[in-house]
Amino acid sequence: MHQGLERALQESSVSTRGDIIRWWEAKRYHFNGFLLAVGLASWLLVMIAGSAAVKTGEDFEEPLGMVFGHVIYLAVANVCYTLGWVVDTVLYKGRPRARMYRSGLIFAVILTALPGVWAVIAWLITVHTGRKLD
């Protein structure tokens, strides 16, 4: 596992709800870093593979979505991240739930990668069939 992620997942001797919130907030930069890296790769795949999969003059993805969609997505992802520590403090067990953090991170990374994966699949379909998408 990535050393930065391992460090982010280390549990400490947290005892208060405020400590749990601080634990989660200290990991927000790791969360956003992973999403930004995967999001950039996904965005590039959509631009390159997606554009190769469609006919000339067609857009694989709505251009405004490519420009503004990532900002909205990152904002919503951070709202969901905040819900992680809200749930963790409501269902207080004395220390943060590293498994919940890890599961949320994995889910967010997979969700972030899906547009790029779909673009590559669409491109492979066009290579196999010899016909570009409308």
Image (cartoon, rainbow, N blue to C red):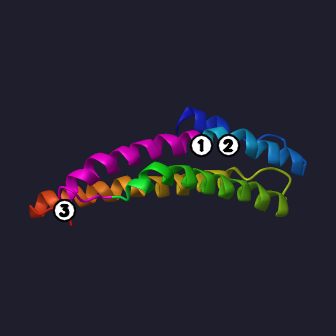
Mark 1 and 2 residues: CB-CB less than 8 Å, in contact? yes
Of the numbered discs 2 and 3, the one sitting upstream in the chain is 2
Q: Amino acid at mark 3?
A: Ile
Determine which quarter of the picture holds residue 122: bottom left
Q: Secondary structure at mark 1?
A: helix
Residue at the spot x=75%, y=43% of the render? 25
| As drawn, 133 above or below 14 | below
Question: What type is the residue that disc 1 sits on?
Answer: Asn
Report helix, strand or loop for mark 3.
Answer: helix
- Residues in magenta, as a range: 32-60
Which residue bears the numbered disc 2? 28
* Residue type, label 2: Arg
Q: Quadrant of the C terminus?
A: bottom left
User: Residue 50 lies in magenta, yes or no?
Assistant: yes
The residue tagged 1 is: 32
The image position of residue 124, as x and y in percent, is 20, 57
Q: Is residue 9 visible?
A: no
- Residue sitting at 68 percent across and 56 percent down? 79
Mark 2–mark 3 Cα distance, whole angstroms, equals 37 Å
- Residue 61 place in picture, x, y as percent: 35, 58
Residue 73 seen from this side: yes
Q: Is residue 56 magenta?
A: yes
Where's residue 47, x and y in %?
A: 32, 48
Task: Identify the residue under disc 3.
Answer: 125
Q: Tell me the SS state at disc 2.
A: helix
Q: Position of residue 78 (x, y in %)?
A: 65, 52
Q: Earlier in the sequence, mark 1 or mark 3?
A: 1
